[in-house]
Image: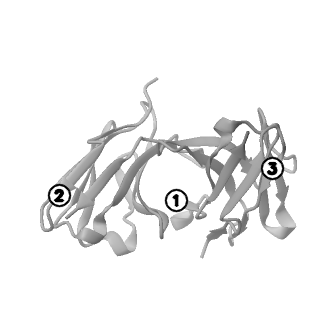
Amino acid sequence: DAGVTQTPRHEVAEKGQTIILKCEPVSGHNDLFWYRQTKIQGLELLSYFRSKSLMEDGGAFKDRFKAEMLNSSFSTLKIQPTEPKDSAVYLCASSLMGPYEQYFGPGTRLTVL
Amino acid sequence: AQKVTQTQTSISVMEKTTVTMDCVYETRDSSYFLFWYKQTASGEIVFLIRQDSYKKENATEGHYSLNFQKPKSSIGLIITATQIEDSAVYFCAMRGLTGNTRKLIFGLGTTLQVQP
C-alpha cells in the first residue's frame, strides 16, 4: 500500500498570498490530521477529520487556516493570507479509526517571504 | 489538559550500547495510548512502538522496548544495540479516546546521536 503522500514538497510564497497544500491518506484510513512543525513549538495540530467530518480545527489556527476533505482519499489545507510566521513544515497523517498509530507524509516545507 | 514532556533535549551514545529516553505525560483519561515516533534527518516521521494504558506488559518491537510505569505517568523508550542509523529525533506522544483527547499530543523530542 502507498503511504501518505503530500504535494508540493516545497512551497515559497509572498506575504499575503493564498497557498493550498495537498494530502492523500493511506487507503482505508478514516482519520486524517494536519500538523504544523516548528523548532520552537514542535508538532501542533491544525485539523483532525474522521470519515470526512471535521472533529477539531486546532483553535488558534482557525482564522487563516482551512482544511477540507473533498473525499475520503484527498484533503487540502489552505492558508489565506500567508504571513512570514507561517513558515514551517506542514505534515499530514492518517490512521485507522480509533486509537491507532498515525502514518505521516513527507511534509511540505513552506517559506513565506 | 493533556501534556507530554520529554526532559532530555539530546543524548549521545556509542554504537552498540543501550539508551533510554524519558517521557512523562499528564492526562485525566482512564484509558489512553502512548506512542514513540522517530524523525530522521530527511524529515520523515516513522511510528516505532505503542503502549496501551490498560496493558501491564511492556511493549517490545525489534530492538525497541518500553518501560511503562503507570503510577509515575512515565513511558520510557529503550533502544538496545544502537546503530548509527538510529541517530534521529525521537518523539513521545499520547492519544485519548474521547472528545478532544483523540488528537495526538507530542513531546518536543529528544535528539539521539549514535557515535561510531
* Residue B9 position in % (x across, y down): 65, 65
**Residue at left 46%, top 43%?**
A94
Which mark, residue A13? Answer: 2
x then y, percent, for residue A88: 35, 60
Distance between the alpha carbons at the discs numbered 1 and 3 = 28 Å
Please give the residue where the numbered disc 3 appears in the rendered image: B19
* Chain of residue at mark 2: A
Near mark 1 (Cα within 10 A), the count class, few <14, some 14-19 or many ≥20, is many
| Helix, strand or loop at mark 3 | strand
Left or right of residue B61, residue B38 in this image: left
Q: Which tag, 1 or 3, sits closer to the chain's start?
A: 3
Mark 3, Cα crowd under 10 Å, few <14 / some 14-19 / many 20+, is some
**Looking at the picture, which amino acid does disc 3 mark?**
Val
The image's colouring method is: one colour
Q: For mark 3, name the chain.
A: B
Compared across the picture, whether A87 is left or right of B95 comes to left
